[in-house]
């Protein structure tokens, strides 16, 4: 298998973290986002949407979208699963992973893409051009603040995002926090002791450097 990725892509990082957690042998193929290699004819032949990551299987099948790639790799590899084992566990992990993405990761992405000078005309990822909407930046900041509040409440009830075990939901949450910190100047706020306790644990895992 080959994973087309970029070190600067937080979505690609989510997949690399899962690969590291599972100890999988996947060839990493870099895509230079700075030169817009993702929009080149060569890359569009692999992923017509023009984004990373993209996973190419041995038979040539291409799987796009970070959550889908993560789920495929987990399903196709040996246990333990990062998505739970029983139907109830799987549902709970999927629920929290989805919340981390829509309420946290997407909020940061919206803010970054509408604020970054280098993304003028590219406020939404993909091939189609969309102008930035500066008014969305303040809303994104409020969404991220709410994300931290909600995450604090959840981590006050459990050791990890989806319960007592590290899961795919923690991968997306960690990627979100680091993305918010580095690209949107919104680190974990003061007073979020549960989030800081959790962050210290998950960021010390070897996969966090993937």
Image (spheres, grey):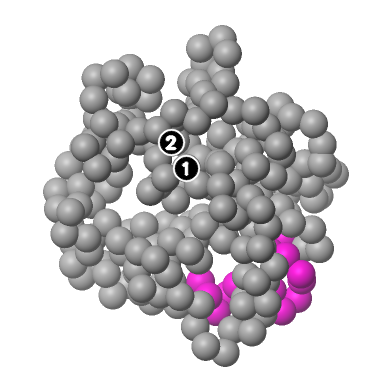
- The residue at 68%/77% (across/down) is 197
- Tell me if residue 90 is in the magenta stretch: no
Q: Quadrant of the N terminus?
A: top right
Q: Which residue occupies the extreme top position in the image?
A: 59
- Tell me if residue 161 is in the magenta stretch: yes
Quadrant position of residue 187: bottom left
Q: Is residue 20 visible?
A: yes
- Name the foreground residue: 52 vs 28: 28
Which of the labelled discs sits on residue 5, or is there none? 2
Instruction: Kindly state the secondary structure of the residue where label 1 is placed.
Output: helix
Horizontal side, residue 43 vs residue 68: left or right: left
Residue 71, percent across and down?
A: 64, 37
Badge 1 local density, few (<14 within 10 Å), some, or many (20+)? many
Q: Which residues are magenta?
A: 146-162
Total labels: the figure holds: 2
In the rendered view, tell whether residue 68 sits above or below residue 116: above
**Sequence-wise, which precedes: disc 1 or disc 2?**
2
Residue 8, percent across and down?
A: 38, 48
Q: Are marks 1 and 2 in contact (CB under 8 Å)?
A: yes
Residue 140, percent across and down?
A: 34, 69
Residue 107, percent across and down?
A: 40, 63
Residue position marked by numbered label 1 in the rendering: 12
In the rendered view, tell whether residue 127 sits above or below residue 175: above
Horizontal side, residue 67 vs residue 138: left or right: right
Instruction: Kindly state the secondary structure of the residue where label 2 is placed.
Output: strand
Q: Which residue occupies the extreme bottom position in the image?
A: 191
- The residue at 30%/61% (across/down) is 112
In the rendered view, tell whether residue 160 sits above or below residue 167: below
Which of the labelled discs sits on residue 157, or is there none? none
């Amino acid at each position: 298998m080959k994973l087309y990725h970029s070190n600067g892509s937080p979505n690609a990082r989510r997949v690399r973290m899962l690969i590291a957690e599972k100890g999988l042998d996947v060839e990493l193929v870099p895509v230079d986002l700075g030169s817009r290699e993702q929009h080149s004819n060569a890359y569009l032949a692999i992923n017509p949407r023009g984004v990373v990551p993209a996973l190419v299987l041995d038979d040539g099948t291409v799987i796009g979208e970070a959550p889908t790639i993560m789920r495929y790799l987990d399903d196709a590899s040996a246990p333990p699963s990062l998505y739970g084992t029983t139907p109830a566990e799987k549902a709970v992990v999927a629920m929290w992973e989805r919340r981390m993405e829509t309420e946290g990761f997407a909020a940061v992405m919206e803010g970054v893409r509408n604020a970054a000078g280098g993304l003028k005309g590219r406020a939404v990822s993909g091939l189609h051009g969309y102008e930035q909407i500066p008014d969305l930046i303040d809303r994104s900041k409020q969404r991220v603040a709410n994300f931290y509040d909600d995450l604090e409440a959840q981590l006050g009830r459990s050791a990890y995002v989806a319960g007592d075990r590290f899961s795919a939901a923690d991968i997306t949450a960690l990627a979100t926090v680091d993305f918010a910190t580095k690209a949107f100047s919104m680190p974990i706020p003061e007073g979020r002791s549960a989030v800081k306790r959790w962050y210290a644990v998950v960021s010390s895992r070897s996969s966090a450097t993937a």
